[in-house]
Image (cartoon, helix red, strand yellow):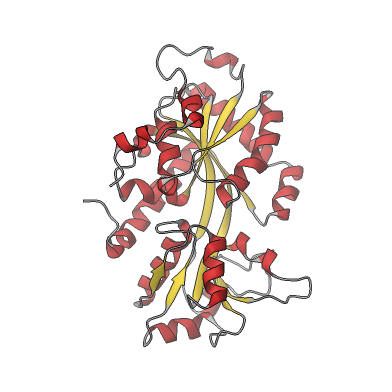
Amino acid sequence: MLTFRRIAGAFGTCAALALAGVTGPTQSLAQDYPTKPVQMIVPFSQGGATDQVARLMAQPLEAALGQPVIIVNQPGAGGAIGLANLAMARADGYFVAIGSDSTLGARPMMSETGYDLSSLTMIARLVEIPSGVAVRADSPYKTLAELVEALKTERLTYSGSGIASGPHLAMAAFLAQQGVTATFVNSDSNQDGLVKLLSGEVQFLTGGGSNFPALFSESGESDIRVLGLAAEERWPFMPDVPTYREQGFDYINSQWFGIVAPAGVPPEVVAKLSSAVAEVVGSDAFKERMKEFFFNPAYLDSEDMLARVIADSEAVRPVLMELGLLKK
């Protein structure tokens, strides 16, 4: 079990930077915010979707705030270490982090992470992507219905970007809805899961939609076949892929990313940060940049983001219980 003490013991140099001055009075008044660089914790390694979102957001946010935004990667424990570090940082708006549907909604219910909703302040949601499922191009399963039908009589395996990640929980919830099961083979990342799929170690892959378009050539050729996306309507980045609903499955699910801060950040600072994010996410330049990486801008303010986290937490609770991942 990941205890608070173990998390504290895992601090590296970056963590020490993020926690510098955790005690004592704030160094500047909220109305003057910001007057110095803002550190943005990414609770995963470089190169993943969370890190990608942070780096795409940092530069335009710098322009909106008028101060540098410094990215600090603090990977470990499925995102728990970085967010636990954030929860203990000074609540002055100069320490923030990138959270997601899984790290904010599911992770605190699984183990003693060192943080929960009461120890964080939601700032704003940034982007979202639909969940999806893919098989190898030579797979016998041509549709989502064929895959579900096979699961009724066969024990298939699948992978994704880690146990209790957004993609894993999205597929686990869908399988439970259909009354079928499959064996999840853990991976360190979506790329690792893709290797398992292509090598034949697993029969299907669960992932956020942004992982799939780059795997297709301009002529539409690929080593994979995307069976469906759990979006409300067809996704502009993959218009030929049917939604789950089109195939007779009433299921919608998306992964999303947003900015969080420690609990107790002054409301004026929350408002300034959220307003700056709204300015960035609503800009044409940011929208065009997001298209290059297959993300959908999806701004929510602090209050609406909190409501979304609470709703996601309640939705995923029975899934975690079914998987035996809900902490006692």
Judged from this view, the residue extending furthest toward the right is 218
- The residue sitting at 63% across, 66% down in the picture is 212
Looking at the image, which residue is at 40% across and 48% down?
A: 105
Q: Is residue 294 above or below residue 56?
A: below
Q: Position of residue 141 (x, y in %)?
A: 53, 85
Query: Where is 91 relative to 292, above or below?
Result: above
- Is residue 19 shown to the viewer in this render? yes
The relative height of residue 109 versus residue 172 in the rendered view (above or below) is above
Task: Give coordinates of residue 263: x percent, y percent.
Answer: 40, 29
Q: Nearer the viewer, residue 42 or 121?
A: 42
To which quarter of the image does residue 119 belong?
A: top left
Instruction: List x then y, in percent, for residue 320.
Output: 32, 59
> Is residue 236 among what the camera can see?
no
- Nearest the eye: 76 or 26: 76
Above or below: residue 149 compared with residue 264? below
Q: Going 31% across and 49% down the picture, which residue do you hit?
A: 109
Tell me the quarter of the picture where residue 68 sits. Answer: top right
